[in-house]
Image (cartoon, rainbow, N blue to C red):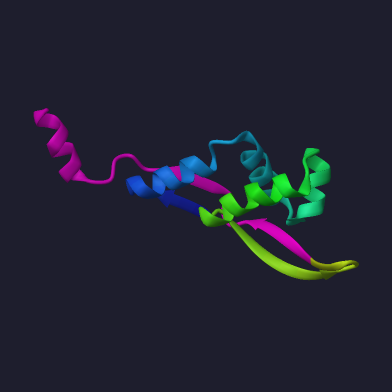
Amino acid sequence: MELTISDPEDILKISRALSVISRINILKLVAENEMSITELSEVLHMTKANISMHINELENSGLIEITYKNGIKGIKKIIKAKYDKIIINLNSGSSSKETYKDG
């Protein structure tokens, strides 16, 4: 699935989410296969708390989906990427072209 954004506020929100290499690595991993916090923690050699913090940021930006499954010791949070491609469209219409011609 593809996400195309052109609204400046949306571009800023997505850019902030992608401004940390750990979040990009998480997105790349969960784009291939859904993974739990524990699995991400093991693969990326990060604490579960650190992974959870990054997951919250990715969820707030709308880039991932979270589901819950029963695990051995309770409920597991399963993370899956919503999009496999993100497109930022900076040319959103002719009205903005007009504004910049005169300046």
Residue drawn at x 49%, y 41% as measured from the top left:
16
Q: Is residue 24 above or below residue 39?
A: above
Residue 94 drawn at (x, y percent)? 18, 44
Residue 84 drawn at (x, y percent)? 58, 49
User: Quadrant of the image for the C terminus?
Assistant: top left
Query: Magenta segment: does it hold 13?
Result: no
Q: Is residue 49 above or below residue 79?
A: above
Left or right placement of residue 81 versus residue 74 in this view: left
Q: Is residue 88 above or below residue 52?
A: above
Farthest-out residue, left: 102
Residue drawn at x 73%, y 49% as measured from the top left:
49
Residue drawn at x 33%, y 49% as measured from the top left:
7
Query: Magenta segment: does it hold 94?
Result: yes
Residue 23 drawn at (x, y percent)? 63, 42
Q: Which residues are magenta?
A: 76-103
Residue 95 drawn at (x, y percent)? 16, 45
Q: How many marks?
A: 0
Farthest-out residue, front: 49
| Depth check, front residue: 8 or 4 | 8
Residue 1 makes an appearance in the image: no
Left or right placement of residue 97 versus residue 77 in this view: left
Farthest-out residue, top: 103
User: Quadrant of the image for the N terminus?
Assistant: bottom right
| Depth check, front residue: 74 or 35 | 74
Left or right placement of residue 85 versus residue 23 in this view: left
In the rendered image, which quarter is residue 21 located in? top right
Residue 16 makes an appearance in the image: yes
Farthest-out residue, bottom: 70
| Depth check, front residue: 26 or 56 | 56
Residue drawn at x 69%, y 51% as measured from the top left:
52
